[in-house]
Amino acid sequence: MGRAGILGCATLRRHALFGVIAVFGLVLRGLVTVAYPSAIMYLGDSAAYLDQARRRMWPGDWRPSGFPMFLRLIDGQAHFTRLVVIQQLLTFAAGLGLYIVALRVARRPWIAALAAAPALLWPWVLDLGQFVLADSLFGTLVTGGVVVLARPGRPTVPACVAGGLLLATAVVIRTVGCGPLVVVGGVLAGAAVRACGRRGGLARSTAFVLAAAMPILGYSTWSVANGGAFSVSAHSGFFLYGRMAPFADCAVLSRADLRTLCDPRPVAERPQPDRYLWPDDSLLRQGNRRIPPGREDLAGEFAGEVLRAQPVMVATTTVGYLIGYFSPVPHENAKTSRAATWEMPDALANILPPEAPHAADGYYVLTRRSQSLGGVLLTYSRLGYAPMPLVGTGLLAGLAAAAIGRRRGRRGQDCSGPGRRGQDCSGPGRLFWLASGAGMSVLVTAALTAGFDYRYLGSVIGLLGAAAVLGWIGLVEVLRPPVAADPQVILKPPQPSALSESGSG
């Protein structure tokens, strides 16, 4: 065998684990696409997106219009199979990107393969890819922004431009994208401050901000030109009202007109946020299909007063939602959306009768399904909950690794294992911080402003899963017994460890 053949075999062996995971991910995507032709509809988001793509774009809808623009770009409104194939390939590309950057950071293929596995294999990712919804595109854009900025070494100006464009475009796809944009921008700004005014740090931060401003300013200007506000969201008060109504204390409201929006029932008997927003008989709509004029602005004032008067309740319910995402069983109660909506379908619809607690939830409908594949994929779909405690504790492990690493570093200790002397203890590295920060910021933003829905988790589980893997590995590294200083290398400056090579500088 020639040198090229030997190198080829060595490369295959080196990436064998990722190859198996990637092939399995492609097979699963193929099975999902075949099982649910040609797409799954989520009412009424899917209908609203398709209506804009087929008729007239306008910035004043309940949701930003970035996804309808994407539909027009690929003609997805007329070819659903094309749309879902592209979405499935986008999420696969996100997993591939995570593998490439994790490999450069960790330098161990098995770690990189595990970091990429959630984006490639997690059931919610596969399920969302089959919906006519913005979440797969949104998740891919956020992951792309993290990937281009998490490569080892200081990010280049072109990488900052690409990251800013990707993350800001995610905002005009789904407004919860504001969280990742702020987190990543904060990381770059912090690096610029630590650079003590050196030109490189300021140039990178400036490039990121200017690039991020382009999609957001463009969309907001379009909104103003159409008679709306200078914003990417025309209905923020609407959704915030639904978030506050389930626990609002009517006594804290200062005006009688605001109290007309307050549910008189005890908090324990109140339903989840959607029941206050969409049914015709809700307090907001007062028996009308459309919200009466001025009523939505009043709902925004209601939400503001409750937020100021009951901050502890807002905080505790938000924490409860976040903890629920990391439960090993479906987190579902009267105050949450249905978990089953985001499990792969084994029926043509999951519509509930009007008296059911979750009847106001959006529900899926599809025209055809493979009966033989449907049951198998549903079983696979339900495997997604069990690993969630490992994801949550992996994120905490990364925080612990950073704290322990900094303490040992201040003491001048080398915390790497045998054969890895001279490496520092700076924690899990920039990929961990960007992936965990971007992923958690989506969940926190949604929990604060909308409520609990596995749909939000499905769009960022690839990032959170990758961060959890890096967190666990980082903790193992810093917990290794300190290595005694070697007189032969004592004069050499410390080199970054496998996971900290891409430190936040």
Image (tube, grey):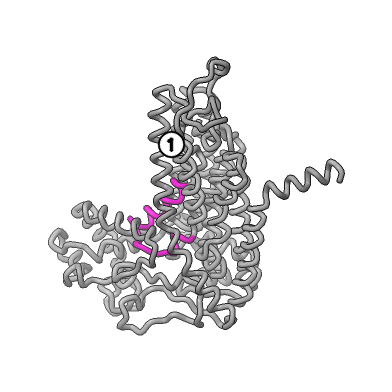
Say which of 492 and 443 sits in front: 492
The x and y percentages for residue 66 are: 53, 59
Residue at x 65% of width, y 58% of height: 20
Residue 445 lies within the magenta run: yes
How crowded pointer 1 is (Cα within 10 Å; few <14, some 14-19, many 20+) is rated as some
Residue at x 39% of width, y 46% of height: 396
User: Disc 1 designates what residue?
Assistant: 479
Residue at x 55% of width, y 59% of height: 137
In the displayed structure, does residue 332 sit left or right of residue 268? right
Relative to 96, residue 255 above or below? below
The quarter holding residue 129 reads bottom right
The x and y percentages for residue 375 are: 53, 78
Residue at x 48% of width, y 56% of height: 461
The x and y percentages for residue 248 are: 21, 62
Magenta range is: 436-458
Say which of 422 and 304 sits in front: 422
For this orientation, the residue located farthest to the right is: 2
The x and y percentages for residue 336 are: 33, 67
Q: What residue type is labelled 1?
A: Leu
Tell me if residue 73 can be seen.
no
Residue 200 lies within the magenta run: no
Say which of 20 and 358 sits in front: 20
Relative to 336, residue 399 above or below? above
Q: Main secondary structure of the magenta part?
A: helix
Tell me if residue 244 can be seen.
yes
Relative to 495, residue 163 above or below? below
For this orientation, the residue located farthest to the left is: 251
Secondary structure at badge 1 equals helix
Q: How many labels, in total?
A: 1
In the displayed structure, does residue 467 sit left or right of residue 324? right
